[in-house]
Amino acid sequence: MAQLTIRLPDEMDRALAAAAERLQRKRAEIVRSALSRFLELDTAGRPADRVRDLLGSVDSGVPDLAEDHRRYILESLRRGA
């Protein structure tokens, strides 16, 4: 396992120490967990990137639905649909 040395602001170090004590876990374990979550989110990309291939794949039959969605929602509510 590789070793990494980091410098933390005093306030962050105190918060990390308090969390470690409260959770009864080692500080390194908490840092590894946080870094792992960060890397998972970073590699997942933005939400739009994850569904980009689906965009435009459904045809509602309404050409201006995105532009005039409020009108269509109100009409639907009036009809009771």
Image (cartoon, rainbow, N blue to C red):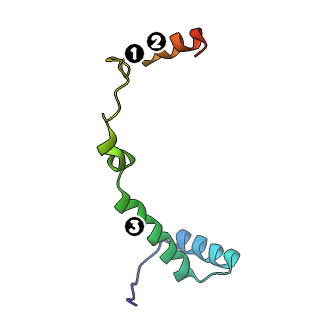
Residue identified by numbered label 3:
39
Whole-Å distance between the Cαs marked 3 and 1?
39 Å
Residue identified by numbered label 1:
68
Query: Which mark is nearer the camera, 3 or 2?
Result: 2
The spot of residue 12 in percent (x, y) is 53, 69
- The answer to whether marks 1 and 2 mark residues whose Cβ atoms lie closer than 8 Å is yes
Residue beneath the point at 55% across and 69% down: 11
Residue type indicated by callout 3: Leu
- Reply above or below: 71 against 27: above
Secondary structure category for the residue under label 1: loop
Mark carried by residue 14: none
Which of the two labelled residues, at mark 3 and mark 1, occupies the earlier sequence position?
A: 3
Residue type indicated by callout 1: Asp
Q: Is residue 77 left or right of residue 67?
A: right
Residue beneath the point at 63% across and 78% down: 20
The spot of residue 57 in percent (x, y) is 31, 35
Q: What is the total number of numbered labels drawn onto the structure image?
A: 3
Quarter occupied by residue 14: bottom right
Q: Residues within 10 Å of mark 2 (few under 14, many from 20)?
A: few
Residue beneath the point at 42% across and 77% down: 7
Query: Which mark is nearer the camera, 3 or 1?
Result: 1
Q: Residues within 10 Å of mark 3 (few under 14, many from 20)?
A: few
Whole-Å distance between the Cαs marked 1 and 2?
6 Å
- The answer to whether marks 3 and 1 mark residues whose Cβ atoms lie closer than 8 Å is no
- Reply above or below: 8 against 47: below
Secondary structure category for the residue under label 3: helix
Residue type indicated by callout 2: Arg
Residue identified by numbered label 2:
71
Quarter occupied by residue 66: top left
The spot of residue 6 in percent (x, y) is 41, 79
Secondary structure category for the residue under label 2: helix
Whole-Å distance between the Cαs marked 3 and 2?
42 Å
